[in-house]
Amino acid sequence: MGFPDDEASKLHHQYYSQYGLAIRGLVRHHEIDPLDFDRKCDGSLPLEDLLKPDPDLRKLLEDIDRSKVRVWALTNAYHTHASRVLRILGVDDLIEGIVYCDYSNPNFSCKPEPEFYQNVGDEEG
């Protein structure tokens, strides 16, 4: 976008405060393609170098009584990033589904908006 770092940082914080997620402000005010943005930002992170399998998290998830609750991941990221993180952590096989920000929808909802949590109910069935 060509902004100096300090201005980009201010915009990030402004849009995060105003919209709950910086990418929403970028989409609305700067005609940024959210899927391209996701590929270039979250998709380019060296997560394999930053995250490792988490045996404690895996044990915690394995110990959940699946007859009483269903285990889903909720994230403000796009599904590709969420799936990648869960895989690297070694818990993707323990998660029934992911409720994520659908960047392909120009009016996507995100946490903490009530519409996002309505999607949880819609996805879960």
Image (cartoon, rainbow, N blue to C red):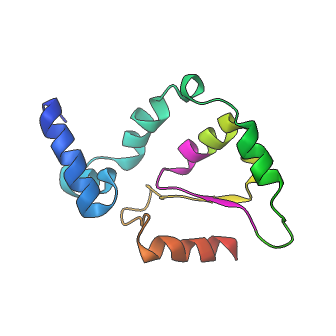
Q: Is residue 92 above or below residue 106?
A: above
**Identity of the residue drawn at 36% across and 66% down:** 107
117 left or right of 105 in image? right
**Residue at the outermost top position:** 49
Task: Looking at the picture, tell me which residue is in the foreground, 82 or 62.
Answer: 62
The residue range painted magenta reads 70-82
94 left or right of 80 in image? right
Q: Quadrant of residue 10?
A: top left
* Picture coordinates of residue 79, whole percent (x, y): 56, 50
Say if the magenta span includes residue 75.
Answer: yes
**Identity of the residue drawn at 14% across and 34% down:** 6
Q: Is residue 110 visible?
A: yes
* Picture coordinates of residue 54, whole percent (x, y): 70, 36
Q: Is residue 45 above or below residue 112?
A: above
**Identity of the residue drawn at 61% across and 76% down:** 122
* Picture coordinates of residue 81, whole percent (x, y): 54, 42
Work out which quarter of the rendered image holds the N terminus and state it.
top left
* Picture coordinates of residue 103, whole percent (x, y): 43, 55
